[in-house]
Image (cartoon, rainbow, N blue to C red):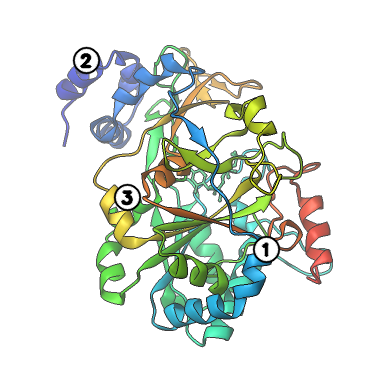
Amino acid sequence: MMTLEEAKQKLATAHQEHVLAFYDELDAMAQAALLEQIAQTDFTVCENARHLGEAGARGAFSPLGAMQLNEIAEKEAIFREKGLEAIRAGKVGCVLLAGGMGTRLGSDNPKGMYDIGLTKHVYIFQRLIENLTDVVKEAGVTVPLFVMTSELNHDATVNFLKEQNYFGYDASKVKFFKQEMAVACDYDGKVFLEEKGRIATSPNGNAGWFTSLLKAGYGTLLEEAGIEWLNIFAVDNVLQRMADPVFTGACIDAGVESGAKVVKKAAPDEKVGVMCLEDGRPSIVEYYDLSKEMMDEKDAAGDPAYNFGVILNYLFRVDALNRIAKTPLTLHVVEKKIKHIDDAGNSVKPDAPNGCKFEQLVLDMIHEMESCLPFEVEREKEFAPIKNATGVDSVESARALCEKNGITL
Ligand code: UTP
């Protein structure tokens, strides 16, 4: 356990002495907890706050063609068989990324607990598990499901799913693990205090999932169970299709290390990350990095060359994940509203961004892959994200899409 002297030294080196400002006011237990947090915290990331807004150096982009709906329709039977074979052999697992804060939706509960039902309960978690259950029925085996939570929503998530009896899913196949947290700081790199005895932290982005899965000890389970593929997906898409036999079969058939479900862009300037090559390797170009020239570029068929947006549904080969897990992913600086206490100990709930959080991004994982298959899916059938309470990508728009797909709410 770290002593007060050691903590002072660590903080002095990191220029974070203010962390102990209220130390004397804390009871013994809170003091010990704070010292433990100081011992565990990596303050070096705060140096990145100064680089906020500076675009990270990107390589040279070039188009990466997607496997499109017509080609998929032609080969669907072959892909489905290959995918089902892998699923039946226990080679495919799913990872639900549910460690986010869902700040835009504005509910205090984990996003998956949000009820989109109108005449009955239809929780987001329920929608996802229902879709996965379709695959279980087709394949005749239960697909292992890993659920990533964070420090902030772990207990609520675990308790809810237990209470709901995992919506009929085989509980022995559901495993939870927590993602790591990163500190939150002001623009000068000084960490915020969340309370007098606690440094403000937040989940470290959705790309740390594999390292966190290994840290939780599930590496052995993957090996023993012979899981060769992991399908990660976002909690907030209520039409999400995971462990999709056709997508899995297509990736196996193509011999790739990873695959990404993509949808055709609604407009050339749609705010979505687009699959591409960067210095010859698979990557994702964010909409704000997509130049006018790239937007206008055409492929051999005369269609836009950067035309397929990612929907946070990726398939990764586990051997490739193990290879890249050896090198830590970059922590990107993102500007956010951060609740904290001020120098006088009063709580502050900012209305506008007031500092930085640090996140690992999936695009960096994709970029480490030798190959990636962009696999087109129909937007109206598979993409109904809930990001906001109203308007674009909201509960309302997701409900409308569910209804279009014959889902009773
Ligand atoms: P978003 O980027 O939409 O973030 O996450 P969010 O935290 O859910 O919502 P806002 O931005 O605060 O409103 C996309 C997916 O990645 C997961 C989310 O749970 C969601 O499934 N995620 C995000 C994590 O698992 N961990 C993170 O640290 C961030």
Q: CA distance from mark 3 to mark 2?
A: 28 Å
Q: Earlier in the sequence, mark 3 or mark 2?
A: 2
177 horizontally vs 290: left or right: left
Q: Is residue 254 left or right of residue 294?
A: left
Can you give x and y, in whole percent of width and height, for residue 360 in the image? 42, 38
265 lies left or right of 177 = right
- In three-dimensional space, the C-alpha distance between marks 2 and 1, rounded to whole angstroms, equals 56 Å
- Residue at horizontal 27 percent and vertical 63 percent from the top: 219
Q: Which residue is mark 1?
A: 69
20 displayed left or right of 167: left
**Badge 3: residue crowd in 10 Å (few <14, some 14–19, many ≥20):** many
Quarter of the image that includes the N terminus: top left
Question: Which residue sits at x=39%, y=79%?
Answer: 90
Ligand 1 placement by image quarter: top right
Could you tell me which secondary element the residue under label 2 belongs to? helix
Q: Secondary structure at mark 3?
A: helix
Q: Residue, x 83% and y 65% (percent of image)?
A: 403
> Which of 155/276 is in front?
276
